[in-house]
Image (spheres, coloured by chain):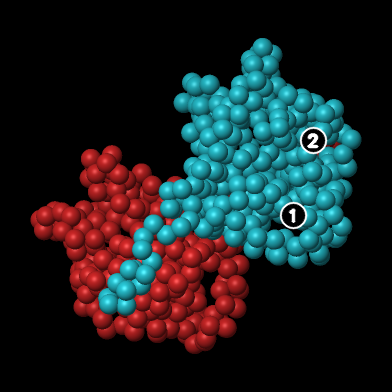
Chain colours: A red, B cyan
């Protein structure tokens, strides 16, 4: 598996184990990868071809009506953790036609009138597609818990509801890749500082980011509980150290490649008579 | 304007003029551009930065709630003309979060139960976004006309309806960039041949492509009528020679840049007190 700088698979290396706590993992580490920023950029470009090839096969299956699988990348993390950069630099290498990108902000009035999973379910990727959730149903047990937006009983109920929901999605053919981008408090300060220092970055800044930052430890605990309660065999969590953007991108790319390799999509067989069509083309 | 290989603007060069006929334009030409495939690839990469910067400003406006404009790229052309390649290689350089990609196939039963513009209207890009239509409402006066899917009176009605619809969309702030990818019959044969020769391309082949190919001249005429009836000052048509993929991509990139420069999106002013937030960050 260590065809490039990887000495183990990102999947093995980054999957949360029982009793895992975010505080125990260095956010600037590069687990499983022997290399630096420079080799990381090179590997990212190299492996983009593999990812792109696999994605095209998956998409081809959908066009041929034989796709039975999809991939769903769930991206979570504190503000500035780099979710947008993952979308741009990892998913940017595959055909946009095969990607369904969904961002989840604060729920609308209509969404609040339904169960918290209602808006999630309707945005699941179709067979043949890679879906990306920029934030997700996990916000309902993260900000929901930290800011007490729901009762403790309701928060409690949600972990089980999430597991049931994900099991059902998996049974329908969706490979779920859950990623928490793990940022250090110091690195977040630097990134927020940059957004405040540069007028062309002001639009990315939200005073609410500081409110969340002040609840740093509470969010850490809420994440630890999420891992404990919802990291299942069918949809395990991966924690990706994110202080080094290049590493986080490389790691998520590997996680996606692994999910697609599990699916092992194949170029669909022609649904027409190839020789007959060659004859028609020659005559046309 | 000719900062790179362009000696005029793509917009001026490619806009259809009164009395234009597709048959009069060489599909392998590279109008307005002094350069070859190699310089074209270089210019595409260079100008991708300009496009990306403009797109990010537009998207930033939407996030700040001050966007009043969007861009809509309408892509038309015969099979294999390269619509997918435009999406991938031109739009691929901008942040996927700011792009709304819509493909229009044969209408569903639900869509057929509405006016032909119903499904189009609901997929118009929101302010702050670049929308891309891979095929569009123009199919309803192209395949609709050639295959007589509607009565002559109905087809006739549609040109006016399209102009009214586009005028309304433009008034709502959408800059409409209409592009017909102009392919030669010989080049199409080669591209279809490749799809038949390569098993990994079979999924892109559809026997219906030959049916349409056999109606080549009828489609040409239907396009000529589209240009005559629907190339308006507010939403003019551009015909982009597409036998050379590198040129078509470069030209569409320039058309998008020009539309965004018309909008001239600006980094939004901070909606918060920057100094106060710096203080909060330092203390957090």
Near-viewer residue (A129 or B44): B44
Q: Quadrant of residue A135?
A: bottom left
Compared with A217, B248 (above or below) is above
Compared with B1, A220 (above or below) is below
> Please, what secondary structure does the residue beneath circle 2 have?
loop
Residue at the image point whose x is 24% and y is 61% from the top: A143
Residue B170 x/y as whole percent: 59, 34
Task: Please give left or right for residue B109 compared with residue A27 in the image.
Answer: right
Q: Is residue B46 visible?
A: yes
User: Mark 2 falls within which chain?
Assistant: B
Residue at the image point whose x is 63% and y is 39% from the top: B176
User: Mark 1 falls within which chain?
Assistant: B
Q: Quadrant of the C terminus of chain A?
A: top right
Near-viewer residue (A120 or B264): B264
Q: Is residue B134 visible?
A: no
Label 1 or label 2, whichever comes before in sequence order: 2
Residue A94 x/y as whole percent: 57, 60
Disc 1: CA contacts within 10 A as few (<14), some (14-19) or many (>=20): many
Q: Quadrant of residue B20?
A: top right
Residue at the image point whose x is 49% and y is 82% from the top: A6
Compared with B91, A225 (above or below) is below
Q: CA distance from mark 1 to mark 2?
A: 18 Å
Disc 2: CA contacts within 10 A as few (<14), some (14-19) or many (>=20): many
Residue at the image point whose x is 67% and y is 34% from the top: B235
The answer to whether tags 1 and 2 share a subunit is yes
Disc 1: which residue:
B250
Q: Which mark is residue B16?
A: 2
Residue A173 x/y as whole percent: 39, 53
Q: Which mark is residue A122?
A: none
Task: Please give left or right for residue B3 compared with residue B45 in the image.
Answer: right
């Amino acid at each position: 598996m260590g065809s490039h700088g990887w000495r183990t698979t990102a999947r093995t290396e980054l999957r949360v184990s029982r009793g895992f706590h975010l505080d125990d993992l260095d956010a600037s580490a590069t687990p499983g990868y022997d290399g630096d920023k420079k080799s990381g950029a090179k590997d990212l470009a190299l492996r983009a071809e593999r990812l792109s090839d696999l994605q095209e096969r998956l998409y081809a299956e959908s066009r041929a009506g034989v796709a039975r699988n999809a991939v769903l990348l769930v991206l979570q993390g504190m503000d500035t953790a780099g979710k947008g950069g993952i979308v741009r630099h990892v998913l940017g290498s595959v055909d946009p036609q095969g990607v369904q990108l969904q961002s989840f902000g604060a729920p609308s009035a209509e969404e609040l009138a339904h169960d918290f999973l209602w808006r999630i379910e309707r945005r699941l990727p179709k067979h043949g597609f890679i879906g990306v959730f920029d934030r997700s149903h996990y916000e309902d047990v993260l900000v929901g818990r930290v800011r007490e937006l729901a009762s403790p009983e309701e928060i409690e109920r949600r972990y089980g509801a999430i597991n049931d929901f994900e099991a059902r999605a998996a049974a329908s053919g969706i490979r779920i890749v859950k990623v928490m981008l793990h940022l250090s408090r110091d690195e977040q300060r630097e990134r927020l500082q940059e957004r405040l220092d540069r007028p062309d970055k002001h639009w990315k800044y939200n005073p609410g980011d500081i409110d969340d930052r002040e609840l740093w430890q509470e969010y850490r605990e809420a994440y630890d509980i999420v891992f404990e309660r919802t990291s299942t065999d069918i949809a395990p969590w991966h924690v990706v150290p994110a202080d080094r953007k290049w590493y986080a991108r490389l790691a998520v790319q590997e996680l996606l490649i692994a999910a697609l390799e599990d699916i092992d999509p194949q170029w669909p067989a022609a649904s027409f008579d190839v020789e007959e069509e060659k004859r028609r083309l020659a005559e046309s």
